Protein backbone atom coordinates (compact mmCIF):
# COMPACT_ATOMS: atom_id res chain seq x y z
CA UNK A 1 0.00 0.00 0.00
CA UNK A 2 2.70 2.47 1.09
CA UNK A 3 4.73 1.37 -1.89
CA UNK A 4 1.90 2.28 -4.27
CA UNK A 5 1.42 5.70 -2.69
CA UNK A 6 5.16 6.42 -2.93
CA UNK A 7 5.24 5.34 -6.57
CA UNK A 8 2.22 7.45 -7.53
CA UNK A 9 3.40 10.56 -5.65
CA UNK A 10 6.89 10.31 -7.16
CA UNK A 11 5.59 9.80 -10.70
CA UNK A 12 2.97 12.56 -10.52
CA UNK A 13 5.61 14.96 -9.19
CA UNK A 14 8.01 14.10 -12.01
CA UNK A 15 5.20 14.34 -14.56
CA UNK A 16 4.16 17.83 -13.46
CA UNK A 17 7.65 19.18 -12.99
CA UNK A 18 9.57 17.55 -15.81
CA UNK A 19 7.92 15.24 -18.29
CA UNK A 20 4.71 17.08 -19.23
CA UNK A 21 6.35 20.53 -19.61
CA UNK A 22 9.12 19.14 -21.82
CA UNK A 23 6.53 17.16 -23.78
CA UNK A 24 4.41 20.27 -24.40
CA UNK A 25 7.38 22.19 -25.81
CA UNK A 26 8.19 19.28 -28.13
CA UNK A 27 4.55 19.14 -29.21
CA UNK A 28 4.29 22.88 -29.82
CA UNK A 29 7.51 22.91 -31.83
CA UNK A 30 6.01 20.51 -34.36
CA UNK A 31 2.32 21.39 -33.99
CA UNK A 32 2.24 22.85 -37.50
CA UNK A 33 4.54 20.27 -38.98
CA UNK A 34 8.21 20.12 -39.71
CA UNK A 35 8.62 23.06 -42.08
CA UNK A 36 7.86 25.92 -39.59
CA UNK A 37 10.45 24.34 -37.31
CA UNK A 38 12.96 24.13 -40.11
CA UNK A 39 12.26 27.69 -41.23
CA UNK A 40 12.70 28.92 -37.66
CA UNK A 41 16.11 27.37 -37.14
CA UNK A 42 17.45 28.35 -40.55
CA UNK A 43 16.88 32.09 -40.32
CA UNK A 44 20.07 34.15 -40.52
CA UNK A 45 20.10 35.14 -36.79
CA UNK A 46 19.41 31.54 -35.73
CA UNK A 47 22.17 30.13 -37.91
CA UNK A 48 24.54 32.78 -36.66
CA UNK A 49 23.61 31.97 -33.06
CA UNK A 50 24.41 28.30 -33.74
CA UNK A 51 27.80 29.23 -35.07
CA UNK A 52 28.66 31.55 -32.16
CA UNK A 53 27.51 28.95 -29.62
CA UNK A 54 29.64 26.27 -31.23
CA UNK A 55 32.72 28.50 -31.44
CA UNK A 56 32.48 29.55 -27.80
CA UNK A 57 31.87 25.98 -26.65
CA UNK A 58 34.80 24.56 -28.62
CA UNK A 59 37.27 27.10 -27.21
CA UNK A 60 35.94 26.52 -23.69
CA UNK A 61 36.14 22.74 -24.02
CA UNK A 62 39.72 22.88 -25.33
CA UNK A 63 40.79 25.22 -22.52
CA UNK A 64 39.12 23.21 -19.79
CA UNK A 65 40.32 19.86 -21.15
CA UNK A 66 43.94 20.98 -20.97
CA UNK A 67 43.36 22.60 -17.57
CA UNK A 68 41.40 19.61 -16.24
CA UNK A 69 44.08 17.13 -17.28
CA UNK A 70 46.93 19.16 -15.82
CA UNK A 71 45.09 20.00 -12.59
CA UNK A 72 43.90 16.41 -12.08
CA UNK A 73 47.42 15.05 -12.62
CA UNK A 74 48.81 17.56 -10.12
CA UNK A 75 46.19 16.73 -7.50
CA UNK A 76 46.26 12.95 -7.94
CA UNK A 77 49.97 12.41 -8.57
CA UNK A 78 51.86 15.02 -6.60
CA UNK A 79 52.26 16.32 -3.08
CA UNK A 80 53.18 19.98 -3.05
CA UNK A 81 52.42 23.07 -1.00
CA UNK A 82 49.18 24.56 -2.26
CA UNK A 83 47.72 21.23 -3.36
CA UNK A 84 44.84 21.44 -0.86
CA UNK A 85 44.16 25.01 -1.96
CA UNK A 86 44.10 23.97 -5.61
CA UNK A 87 41.75 21.11 -4.79
CA UNK A 88 39.34 23.49 -3.05
CA UNK A 89 39.62 26.32 -5.58
CA UNK A 90 38.69 24.09 -8.50
CA UNK A 91 35.21 23.67 -6.98
CA UNK A 92 34.79 27.41 -6.38
CA UNK A 93 33.00 28.11 -9.71
CA UNK A 94 30.15 25.81 -8.61
CA UNK A 95 29.33 28.25 -5.80
CA UNK A 96 29.18 31.31 -8.02
CA UNK A 97 25.98 32.54 -9.64
CA UNK A 98 26.30 32.86 -13.45
CA UNK A 99 25.42 36.55 -13.21
CA UNK A 100 28.21 37.09 -10.70
CA UNK A 101 30.61 35.34 -13.11
CA UNK A 102 29.68 37.87 -15.77
CA UNK A 103 30.03 40.80 -13.38
CA UNK A 104 33.41 39.53 -12.18
CA UNK A 105 34.75 39.38 -15.73
CA UNK A 106 33.42 42.87 -16.52
CA UNK A 107 35.19 44.24 -13.43
CA UNK A 108 38.54 42.99 -14.74
CA UNK A 109 38.26 42.98 -18.53
CA UNK A 110 35.73 45.79 -19.02
CA UNK A 111 36.86 48.83 -20.97
CA UNK A 112 36.88 51.04 -17.88
CA UNK A 113 39.09 48.75 -15.77
CA UNK A 114 42.91 48.85 -15.86
CA UNK A 115 43.47 45.43 -17.45
CA UNK A 116 40.58 45.84 -19.88
CA UNK A 117 41.80 49.29 -20.93
CA UNK A 118 45.30 47.95 -21.51
CA UNK A 119 43.96 45.11 -23.69
CA UNK A 120 41.61 47.48 -25.50
CA UNK A 121 44.52 49.81 -26.31
CA UNK A 122 46.23 46.81 -27.92
CA UNK A 123 43.19 46.01 -30.01
CA UNK A 124 41.86 43.14 -27.89
CA UNK A 125 38.21 43.52 -27.01
CA UNK A 126 37.11 41.05 -24.34
CA UNK A 127 33.73 42.19 -23.03
CA UNK A 128 30.86 42.31 -25.58
CA UNK A 129 32.93 40.05 -27.76
CA UNK A 130 33.96 36.43 -28.23
CA UNK A 131 36.93 36.28 -25.77
CA UNK A 132 34.73 37.40 -22.87
CA UNK A 133 32.08 34.83 -23.75
CA UNK A 134 34.74 32.12 -23.87
CA UNK A 135 36.11 33.22 -20.47
CA UNK A 136 32.60 33.18 -18.96
CA UNK A 137 31.91 29.72 -20.37
CA UNK A 138 35.27 28.42 -19.15
CA UNK A 139 34.52 29.77 -15.68
CA UNK A 140 31.18 27.99 -15.28
CA UNK A 141 32.37 24.66 -16.70
CA UNK A 142 35.83 24.66 -15.13
CA UNK A 143 35.43 22.00 -12.40
CA UNK A 144 33.56 19.37 -14.42
CA UNK A 145 36.44 17.58 -16.13
CA UNK A 146 38.96 17.74 -13.28
CA UNK A 147 36.31 16.36 -10.89
CA UNK A 148 35.78 13.33 -13.14
CA UNK A 149 39.49 12.66 -13.58
CA UNK A 150 40.84 12.96 -10.03
CA UNK A 151 39.01 9.94 -8.52
CA UNK A 152 39.80 7.75 -11.55
CA UNK A 153 43.48 8.69 -11.44
CA UNK A 154 43.58 7.93 -7.73
CA UNK A 155 41.84 4.60 -8.23
CA UNK A 156 44.13 3.30 -10.97
CA UNK A 157 47.15 4.12 -8.82
CA UNK A 158 50.69 4.71 -9.97
CA UNK A 159 52.13 1.19 -10.25
CA UNK A 160 52.01 1.00 -14.02
CA UNK A 161 53.34 4.54 -14.39
CA UNK A 162 56.20 3.74 -12.05
CA UNK A 163 56.96 0.60 -14.01
CA UNK A 164 57.13 2.67 -17.21
CA UNK A 165 59.48 5.18 -15.59
CA UNK A 166 61.67 2.40 -14.25
CA UNK A 167 61.92 1.08 -17.77
CA UNK A 168 63.12 4.48 -18.96
CA UNK A 169 60.01 6.11 -20.39
CA UNK A 170 59.85 9.90 -20.24
CA UNK A 171 57.10 11.73 -18.37
CA UNK A 172 55.29 12.53 -21.60
CA UNK A 173 55.61 8.97 -22.93
CA UNK A 174 54.29 7.57 -19.67
CA UNK A 175 51.34 9.90 -19.78
CA UNK A 176 50.51 9.17 -23.40
CA UNK A 177 51.02 5.40 -23.34
CA UNK A 178 49.97 4.46 -19.80
CA UNK A 179 47.86 7.14 -18.10
CA UNK A 180 45.78 8.40 -21.01
CA UNK A 181 44.45 4.98 -22.11
CA UNK A 182 43.51 4.19 -18.50
CA UNK A 183 41.46 7.35 -18.04
CA UNK A 184 39.98 7.61 -21.53
CA UNK A 185 36.38 6.91 -20.51
CA UNK A 186 36.43 9.35 -17.63
CA UNK A 187 38.05 11.88 -19.97
CA UNK A 188 35.33 11.36 -22.59
CA UNK A 189 32.66 11.63 -19.90
CA UNK A 190 34.15 14.86 -18.57
CA UNK A 191 34.45 16.37 -22.06
CA UNK A 192 30.78 15.58 -22.76
CA UNK A 193 29.72 17.19 -19.46
CA UNK A 194 31.84 20.27 -20.18
CA UNK A 195 30.51 20.56 -23.72
CA UNK A 196 26.90 20.29 -22.54
CA UNK A 197 27.43 22.96 -19.92
CA UNK A 198 29.21 25.19 -22.44
CA UNK A 199 26.50 24.89 -25.10
CA UNK A 200 23.78 25.67 -22.57
CA UNK A 201 25.32 28.50 -20.58
CA UNK A 202 23.01 31.49 -20.36
CA UNK A 203 23.47 33.87 -17.41
CA UNK A 204 27.22 34.48 -17.51
CA UNK A 205 27.21 34.88 -21.28
CA UNK A 206 24.15 37.16 -21.11
CA UNK A 207 26.10 39.57 -18.91
CA UNK A 208 29.39 39.68 -20.85
CA UNK A 209 28.13 39.37 -24.43
CA UNK A 210 25.61 42.17 -24.71
CA UNK A 211 23.61 39.70 -26.84
CA UNK A 212 24.03 41.66 -30.07
CA UNK A 213 21.92 39.98 -32.76
CA UNK A 214 24.04 38.50 -35.51
CA UNK A 215 27.20 39.18 -33.52
CA UNK A 216 27.50 37.94 -29.96
CA UNK A 217 24.16 36.18 -29.62
CA UNK A 218 24.36 32.55 -28.59
CA UNK A 219 21.58 30.01 -28.94
CA UNK A 220 20.35 30.43 -25.36
CA UNK A 221 20.29 34.22 -25.75
CA UNK A 222 18.43 33.72 -29.03
CA UNK A 223 15.77 31.68 -27.20
CA UNK A 224 15.26 34.46 -24.70
CA UNK A 225 15.11 37.17 -27.34
CA UNK A 226 12.68 35.28 -29.59
CA UNK A 227 10.41 34.58 -26.65
CA UNK A 228 10.40 38.18 -25.53
CA UNK A 229 9.74 39.31 -29.11
CA UNK A 230 6.58 37.18 -29.08
CA UNK A 231 7.96 34.78 -31.63
CA UNK A 232 7.32 31.54 -29.75
CA UNK A 233 8.04 29.24 -32.70
CA UNK A 234 11.58 30.63 -32.96
CA UNK A 235 12.08 30.17 -29.23
CA UNK A 236 10.53 26.69 -29.24
CA UNK A 237 12.54 25.55 -32.24
CA UNK A 238 15.88 26.67 -30.79
CA UNK A 239 14.88 25.20 -27.40
CA UNK A 240 14.03 21.93 -29.08
CA UNK A 241 17.51 21.78 -30.59
CA UNK A 242 19.10 22.52 -27.20
CA UNK A 243 16.87 19.95 -25.50
CA UNK A 244 17.79 17.30 -28.08
CA UNK A 245 21.47 18.05 -27.42
CA UNK A 246 20.79 17.65 -23.67
CA UNK A 247 19.04 14.31 -24.20
CA UNK A 248 21.84 13.03 -26.45
CA UNK A 249 24.29 14.03 -23.71
CA UNK A 250 22.22 12.08 -21.16
CA UNK A 251 22.28 9.00 -23.37
CA UNK A 252 26.05 9.26 -23.90
CA UNK A 253 26.58 9.71 -20.17
CA UNK A 254 24.48 6.65 -19.41
CA UNK A 255 26.50 4.64 -21.90
CA UNK A 256 29.85 5.87 -20.57
CA UNK A 257 29.13 5.67 -16.86
CA UNK A 258 29.09 1.87 -16.43
CA UNK A 259 32.34 1.49 -18.40
CA UNK A 260 34.12 3.77 -16.01
CA UNK A 261 33.35 1.47 -13.08
CA UNK A 262 33.86 -1.91 -14.73
CA UNK B 1 41.29 -4.63 -10.01
CA UNK B 2 43.41 -5.79 -12.92
CA UNK B 3 46.16 -3.25 -12.35
CA UNK B 4 46.98 -4.86 -9.02
CA UNK B 5 48.33 -7.94 -10.83
CA UNK B 6 51.23 -6.06 -12.41
CA UNK B 7 54.76 -7.01 -11.37
CA UNK B 8 55.16 -3.58 -9.83
CA UNK B 9 53.08 -4.69 -6.88
CA UNK B 10 56.06 -6.34 -5.30
CA UNK B 11 57.92 -3.07 -5.32
CA UNK B 12 54.99 -1.01 -4.12
CA UNK B 13 55.79 0.73 -0.87
CA UNK B 14 53.02 1.95 1.44
CA UNK B 15 51.20 4.85 -0.08
CA UNK B 16 52.13 8.19 1.51
CA UNK B 17 55.90 7.62 1.86
CA UNK B 18 55.91 6.06 -1.61
CA UNK B 19 54.51 9.22 -3.08
CA UNK B 20 56.76 11.67 -1.29
CA UNK B 21 59.75 9.48 -2.08
CA UNK B 22 58.77 9.46 -5.74
CA UNK B 23 58.15 13.17 -5.95
CA UNK B 24 61.39 14.07 -4.24
CA UNK B 25 63.48 11.58 -6.16
CA UNK B 26 62.06 12.05 -9.60
CA UNK B 27 59.64 14.78 -10.39
CA UNK B 28 58.78 14.75 -14.11
CA UNK B 29 60.10 17.78 -15.93
CA UNK B 30 56.59 19.09 -16.60
CA UNK B 31 55.73 19.58 -12.92
CA UNK B 32 56.79 23.23 -12.63
CA UNK B 33 55.18 24.04 -15.94
CA UNK B 34 51.93 22.40 -14.82
CA UNK B 35 51.78 24.33 -11.55
CA UNK B 36 52.49 27.56 -13.40
CA UNK B 37 49.83 26.93 -16.02
CA UNK B 38 47.15 25.98 -13.50
CA UNK B 39 47.93 29.00 -11.32
CA UNK B 40 47.76 31.48 -14.20
CA UNK B 41 44.62 29.91 -15.66
CA UNK B 42 42.75 29.93 -12.34
CA UNK B 43 43.95 33.44 -11.50
CA UNK B 44 43.02 35.08 -14.78
CA UNK B 45 39.62 33.46 -15.10
CA UNK B 46 38.41 32.85 -11.55
CA UNK B 47 40.44 34.39 -8.74
CA UNK B 48 41.27 37.89 -9.97
CA UNK B 49 37.72 38.50 -11.29
CA UNK B 50 36.11 37.30 -8.05
CA UNK B 51 38.61 39.39 -6.10
CA UNK B 52 37.56 42.38 -8.21
CA UNK B 53 33.91 41.81 -7.24
CA UNK B 54 34.77 41.75 -3.55
CA UNK B 55 37.05 44.79 -3.91
CA UNK B 56 34.35 46.74 -5.75
CA UNK B 57 31.73 45.86 -3.13
CA UNK B 58 34.03 47.35 -0.49
CA UNK B 59 35.04 50.39 -2.53
CA UNK B 60 32.98 52.64 -0.27
CA UNK B 61 33.85 50.82 2.92
CA UNK B 62 31.71 48.39 4.89
CA UNK B 63 29.07 51.03 5.49
CA UNK B 64 28.80 51.51 1.73
CA UNK B 65 28.39 47.76 1.30
CA UNK B 66 25.70 47.76 3.98
CA UNK B 67 23.97 50.71 2.32
CA UNK B 68 23.83 48.87 -1.04
CA UNK B 69 22.52 45.63 0.44
CA UNK B 70 19.82 47.34 2.47
CA UNK B 71 18.32 49.20 -0.51
CA UNK B 72 14.62 48.18 -0.48
CA UNK B 73 14.71 46.37 -3.84
CA UNK B 74 17.95 44.57 -3.01
CA UNK B 75 16.68 43.54 0.40
CA UNK B 76 13.39 42.32 -1.05
CA UNK B 77 15.18 40.22 -3.69
CA UNK B 78 17.46 38.79 -1.04
CA UNK B 79 14.58 37.92 1.27
CA UNK B 80 12.66 36.27 -1.57
CA UNK B 81 15.71 34.31 -2.73
CA UNK B 82 16.57 32.95 0.69
CA UNK B 83 12.95 32.16 1.59
CA UNK B 84 12.19 30.40 -1.68
CA UNK B 85 15.51 28.53 -1.63
CA UNK B 86 14.80 27.28 1.89
CA UNK B 87 11.32 26.12 0.86
CA UNK B 88 12.70 24.45 -2.27
CA UNK B 89 15.38 22.68 -0.24
CA UNK B 90 12.82 21.28 2.20
CA UNK B 91 10.58 20.05 -0.64
CA UNK B 92 13.65 18.49 -2.27
CA UNK B 93 14.61 16.72 0.93
CA UNK B 94 11.19 15.00 1.00
CA UNK B 95 10.52 14.48 -2.69
CA UNK B 96 14.12 13.63 -3.54
CA UNK B 97 14.18 10.91 -0.90
CA UNK B 98 10.82 9.58 -2.05
CA UNK B 99 11.90 9.51 -5.71
CA UNK B 100 15.21 7.84 -4.83
CA UNK B 101 13.28 5.24 -2.82
CA UNK B 102 10.93 4.54 -5.73
CA UNK B 103 13.82 4.22 -8.16
CA UNK B 104 15.80 1.80 -5.96
CA UNK B 105 13.19 -0.29 -4.17
CA UNK B 106 10.24 -0.28 -6.55
CA UNK B 107 9.98 -1.99 -9.93
CA UNK B 108 7.75 -0.66 -12.68
CA UNK B 109 7.85 -0.41 -16.47
CA UNK B 110 9.76 2.62 -17.75
CA UNK B 111 11.83 2.87 -14.59
CA UNK B 112 15.15 3.06 -16.38
CA UNK B 113 13.93 5.93 -18.55
CA UNK B 114 12.65 7.82 -15.50
CA UNK B 115 15.99 7.20 -13.79
CA UNK B 116 17.88 8.67 -16.75
CA UNK B 117 15.47 11.63 -16.99
CA UNK B 118 16.29 12.73 -13.43
CA UNK B 119 19.51 14.24 -14.78
CA UNK B 120 17.69 16.20 -17.49
CA UNK B 121 17.49 19.42 -15.42
CA UNK B 122 21.30 19.40 -15.20
CA UNK B 123 21.71 18.84 -18.93
CA UNK B 124 19.00 21.24 -20.09
CA UNK B 125 20.06 24.90 -20.49
CA UNK B 126 18.40 26.99 -17.79
CA UNK B 127 16.66 29.31 -20.25
CA UNK B 128 15.08 26.26 -21.89
CA UNK B 129 13.99 25.07 -18.44
CA UNK B 130 12.20 28.38 -17.96
CA UNK B 131 10.53 28.16 -21.36
CA UNK B 132 9.48 24.56 -20.76
CA UNK B 133 7.86 25.41 -17.41
CA UNK B 134 6.10 28.37 -18.97
CA UNK B 135 4.45 25.95 -21.40
CA UNK B 136 2.61 24.31 -18.50
CA UNK B 137 2.39 27.12 -15.98
CA UNK B 138 2.35 30.20 -18.23
CA UNK B 139 -0.37 32.30 -19.90
CA UNK B 140 -0.81 29.66 -22.61
CA UNK B 141 -0.96 26.85 -20.05
CA UNK B 142 -2.39 23.61 -21.35
CA UNK B 143 -4.22 23.00 -18.07
CA UNK B 144 -5.16 26.60 -17.28
CA UNK B 145 -2.76 26.71 -14.38
CA UNK B 146 -1.45 30.26 -14.59
CA UNK B 147 1.35 30.64 -12.11
CA UNK B 148 3.68 32.70 -14.28
CA UNK B 149 4.88 36.01 -12.84
CA UNK B 150 4.00 34.95 -9.27
CA UNK B 151 6.17 33.71 -6.43
CA UNK B 152 4.98 30.09 -6.79
CA UNK B 153 6.40 30.23 -10.33
CA UNK B 154 9.83 31.02 -8.85
CA UNK B 155 9.45 28.00 -6.55
CA UNK B 156 8.62 25.73 -9.48
CA UNK B 157 11.57 26.98 -11.53
CA UNK B 158 13.96 26.34 -8.65
CA UNK B 159 12.42 22.91 -7.93
CA UNK B 160 13.05 22.01 -11.57
CA UNK B 161 16.73 22.96 -11.66
CA UNK B 162 17.54 21.42 -8.25
CA UNK B 163 15.62 18.16 -8.75
CA UNK B 164 18.67 15.87 -9.20
CA UNK B 165 20.65 16.86 -6.09
CA UNK B 166 18.89 14.91 -3.32
CA UNK B 167 17.83 12.04 -5.61
CA UNK B 168 21.39 11.48 -6.80
CA UNK B 169 22.93 11.72 -3.33
CA UNK B 170 20.40 9.40 -1.64
CA UNK B 171 20.18 6.80 -4.42
CA UNK B 172 23.65 5.22 -4.05
CA UNK B 173 23.33 5.05 -0.25
CA UNK B 174 19.97 3.34 -0.56
CA UNK B 175 21.39 0.85 -3.05
CA UNK B 176 24.19 -0.20 -0.72
CA UNK B 177 22.03 -0.37 2.37
CA UNK B 178 21.98 -3.81 3.96
CA UNK B 179 18.42 -5.12 3.80
CA UNK B 180 18.86 -7.61 6.62
CA UNK B 181 18.25 -4.92 9.24
CA UNK B 182 14.96 -4.02 7.61
CA UNK B 183 13.90 -7.65 7.41
CA UNK B 184 14.80 -8.10 11.07
CA UNK B 185 12.68 -5.07 12.00
CA UNK B 186 9.77 -6.40 9.96
CA UNK B 187 9.99 -9.88 11.41
CA UNK B 188 9.85 -8.30 14.87
CA UNK B 189 6.51 -6.79 13.90
CA UNK B 190 7.39 -3.29 12.73
CA UNK B 191 5.16 -1.85 10.01
CA UNK B 192 6.87 -0.90 6.78
CA UNK B 193 6.54 2.80 7.65
CA UNK B 194 8.06 2.26 11.10
CA UNK B 195 10.86 0.25 9.49
CA UNK B 196 11.54 3.08 7.09
CA UNK B 197 11.49 5.72 9.81
CA UNK B 198 13.52 3.86 12.43
CA UNK B 199 15.89 1.74 10.34
CA UNK B 200 16.29 3.17 6.84
CA UNK B 201 15.93 6.91 7.40
CA UNK B 202 18.74 7.31 9.99
CA UNK B 203 21.14 5.83 7.44
CA UNK B 204 19.99 8.27 4.78
CA UNK B 205 20.18 11.46 6.84
CA UNK B 206 23.74 12.48 5.85
CA UNK B 207 22.98 11.95 2.15
CA UNK B 208 19.69 13.86 2.41
CA UNK B 209 21.40 16.76 4.18
CA UNK B 210 24.25 16.83 1.67
CA UNK B 211 21.84 16.91 -1.28
CA UNK B 212 19.73 19.56 0.43
CA UNK B 213 22.77 21.78 1.05
CA UNK B 214 23.78 21.54 -2.61
CA UNK B 215 20.27 22.33 -3.80
CA UNK B 216 20.14 25.37 -1.50
CA UNK B 217 23.47 26.65 -2.83
CA UNK B 218 22.25 26.19 -6.39
CA UNK B 219 18.87 27.79 -5.69
CA UNK B 220 20.22 31.04 -4.22
CA UNK B 221 22.45 31.62 -7.24
CA UNK B 222 19.95 30.58 -9.94
CA UNK B 223 19.33 33.01 -12.78
CA UNK B 224 18.36 31.59 -16.18
CA UNK B 225 15.34 29.48 -15.27
CA UNK B 226 13.66 32.31 -13.36
CA UNK B 227 14.15 35.00 -16.03
CA UNK B 228 11.19 34.07 -18.23
CA UNK B 229 8.76 32.60 -15.73
CA UNK B 230 9.09 35.05 -12.82
CA UNK B 231 8.48 38.21 -14.84
CA UNK B 232 11.25 39.86 -12.75
CA UNK B 233 8.89 42.20 -10.92
CA UNK B 234 10.97 44.19 -8.38
CA UNK B 235 9.83 43.71 -4.79
CA UNK B 236 7.69 40.75 -5.84
CA UNK B 237 9.23 38.05 -8.03
CA UNK B 238 12.72 39.39 -8.63
CA UNK B 239 15.33 36.97 -7.23
CA UNK B 240 18.78 38.14 -6.15
CA UNK B 241 20.60 37.03 -9.32
CA UNK B 242 18.07 38.84 -11.53
CA UNK B 243 18.38 41.92 -9.33
CA UNK B 244 22.16 41.83 -9.80
CA UNK B 245 21.61 41.58 -13.55
CA UNK B 246 19.29 44.59 -13.63
CA UNK B 247 21.76 46.60 -11.51
CA UNK B 248 24.53 45.83 -14.03
CA UNK B 249 22.24 46.91 -16.88
CA UNK B 250 21.42 50.19 -15.12
CA UNK B 251 25.12 50.83 -14.43
CA UNK B 252 24.98 50.42 -10.66
CA UNK B 253 27.98 48.11 -10.69
CA UNK B 254 28.86 48.79 -7.06
CA UNK B 255 25.38 47.74 -5.92
CA UNK B 256 25.60 44.63 -8.09
CA UNK B 257 29.00 43.82 -6.59
CA UNK B 258 27.70 44.24 -3.04
CA UNK B 259 24.84 41.79 -3.54
CA UNK B 260 27.18 39.44 -5.43
CA UNK B 261 29.62 39.38 -2.54
CA UNK B 262 26.82 38.49 -0.14
CA UNK B 263 25.54 35.69 -2.40
CA UNK B 264 29.07 34.38 -2.74
CA UNK B 265 29.50 34.38 1.03
CA UNK B 266 26.23 32.49 1.62
CA UNK B 267 27.10 29.91 -1.04
CA UNK B 268 30.56 29.36 0.47
CA UNK B 269 29.11 28.89 3.96
CA UNK B 270 26.58 26.36 2.62
CA UNK B 271 29.26 24.48 0.70
CA UNK B 272 31.47 24.41 3.79
CA UNK B 273 28.51 22.89 5.66
CA UNK B 274 28.23 20.36 2.84
CA UNK B 275 31.89 19.42 3.26
CA UNK B 276 31.39 18.98 7.00
CA UNK B 277 28.34 16.76 6.42
CA UNK B 278 30.33 14.59 4.05
CA UNK B 279 33.18 14.22 6.51
CA UNK B 280 30.68 13.31 9.22
CA UNK B 281 29.08 10.75 6.90
CA UNK B 282 32.35 9.06 5.98
CA UNK B 283 33.34 8.87 9.63
CA UNK B 284 29.98 7.31 10.49
CA UNK B 285 29.91 4.95 7.53
Image: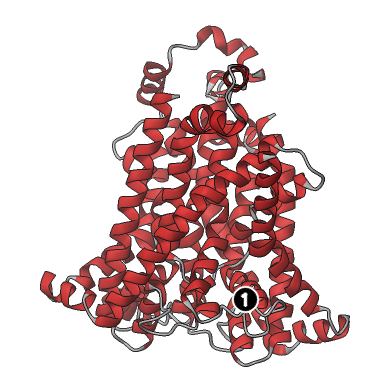
Identified at 62% across, 76% down, the residue is: B137
Q: Is residue B61 left or right of residue B18?
A: left
Query: Which image quarter: residue A195?
Result: bottom right
**Residue furthest toward the top?**
B10
Residue B212 in picture, x, y percent from top left: 45, 49
Say whether residue A134 is visible. yes
Q: Residues within 10 Å of mark 1 (few under 14, many from 20)?
A: many
Q: A25 above or below B111?
A: below
In the picture of the structure, the residue carrying the numbered disc 1 is: B137
The residue located at (31%, 78%) in the rendering is: A118
Residue farthest to the bottom, as pictured = A229
Image quadrant in which the N terminus of chain A is located = top right
Q: Position of residue B56 (x, y in %)?
A: 22, 73
- Colour theme: secondary structure
Q: Position of residue A36 (x, y in %)?
A: 83, 86
Q: Nearer the viewer, residue B28 or B48?
A: B48
Q: Left or right of A257: which side holds A152?
A: left
**As displayed, is residue A108 above or below residue B272?**
below
Residue B210: percent from the left, percent from the top?
Answer: 44, 43
Seen at 42% across and 61% down, the residue is B85
Element assignment for label 1: helix
Q: Residue A93: in sight, yes or no?
A: no
Instruction: Please state the chain letter of the residue tagged with numbered disc 1 in the rendered image.
Output: B
The answer to whether A166 appears left or right of B101 in the picture is left
- Which quadrant would residue B62 be assigned to in this image? bottom left
Image point (75%, 82%), residue name: A41
Name the residue nearer the viewer: A258 or B128: B128
Amino acid sequence: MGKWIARIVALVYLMLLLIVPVGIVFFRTFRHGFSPFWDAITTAPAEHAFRVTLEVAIFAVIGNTVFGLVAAMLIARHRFPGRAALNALIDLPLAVSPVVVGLALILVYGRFEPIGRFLDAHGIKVIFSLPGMVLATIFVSLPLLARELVPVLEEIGMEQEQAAWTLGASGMQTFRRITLPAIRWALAYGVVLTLARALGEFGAVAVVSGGLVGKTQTLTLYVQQEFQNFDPIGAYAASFVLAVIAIVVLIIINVLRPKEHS
Amino acid sequence: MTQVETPAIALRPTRPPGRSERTSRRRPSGFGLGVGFVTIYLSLIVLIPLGAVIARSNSQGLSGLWHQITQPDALASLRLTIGVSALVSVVNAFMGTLIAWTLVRDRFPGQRVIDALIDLPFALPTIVAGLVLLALYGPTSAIHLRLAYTRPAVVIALLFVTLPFVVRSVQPVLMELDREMEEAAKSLGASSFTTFRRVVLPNLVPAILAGTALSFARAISEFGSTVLISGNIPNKTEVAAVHIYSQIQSDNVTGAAALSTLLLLIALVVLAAFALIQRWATRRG
